[in-house]
Amino acid sequence: MSSPREAHFAPFESMENGKIVGYGADLMHYVLDTDLAGVEVRQLDLPFQGILPGLDTRKFDFVVTSVTVNKARYDQFAFMAIPSANSPTGLGAGEG
């Protein structure tokens, strides 16, 4: 099986000693170890722009990565029922 991610977004995904590490990788390993023992997954480090289109064309088996769920993505893909992280957006400006 194959699972892509863009491993340049710590702490969710990053590279360490040539391996993909972080929250997404930890979650994937937890699910595999708990429910799918013995299943081998090839983790791929790819540009984010190709991850969801690749999943849509079945180039990849599944994706465990950080992504904003919008209506178009929600209508096209099966996401977790409960978001696993919240990433609010803010704007800061200095005086002057």
Image (tube, helix red, strand yellow):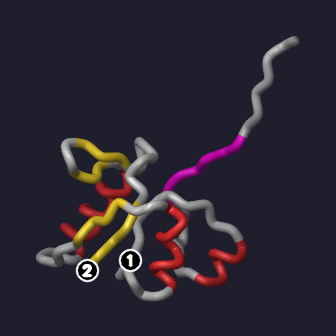
Residue 82 falls left or right of residue 37: right
> What span is colored magenta in the figure?
84-89
Kindly state the secondary structure of the residue where label 2 is placed.
loop
Quarter holding the C terminus is top right
Q: Is residue 75 magenta?
A: no
Label 1–label 2 contact, CB within 8 A: yes
Q: Residue at x 37, y 80 (%)?
A: 60
Q: Residue at x 33, y 59 (%)?
A: 27
| Dot label at residue 1 | 2
Query: Hey, which quadrant is residue 68 in on the image?
Result: bottom right
Residue in the image at 23% along x and 75% along y: 35
Where residue 26 sits in the image (x, y, percent)?
29, 55
Q: Would you say 12 lies left or right of 18 here?
A: right
Label the magenta part by its dominant secondary structure.
loop
Q: Residues within 10 Å of mark 1 (few under 14, many from 20)?
A: some
- Residue sticking out furthest to the top: 96
Q: Please give the residue where the numbered disc 1 appears in the rendered image.
A: 62
Q: Residue at x 79, y 17 (%)?
A: 94
Q: Is residue 17 above or below residue 91?
A: below
Q: Amino acid at mark 1?
A: Phe
In the image shown, does 74 or 50 lie closer to the viewer? 50
Q: Please tell me whether mark 1 sits on a helix, a strand or a loop.
A: loop
- How many C-alpha atoms fall within 10 Å of the one at disc 2: few (<14), some, or many (≥20)? few
Instruction: Say which label, 1 or 2, has the lower sequence index.
Output: 2
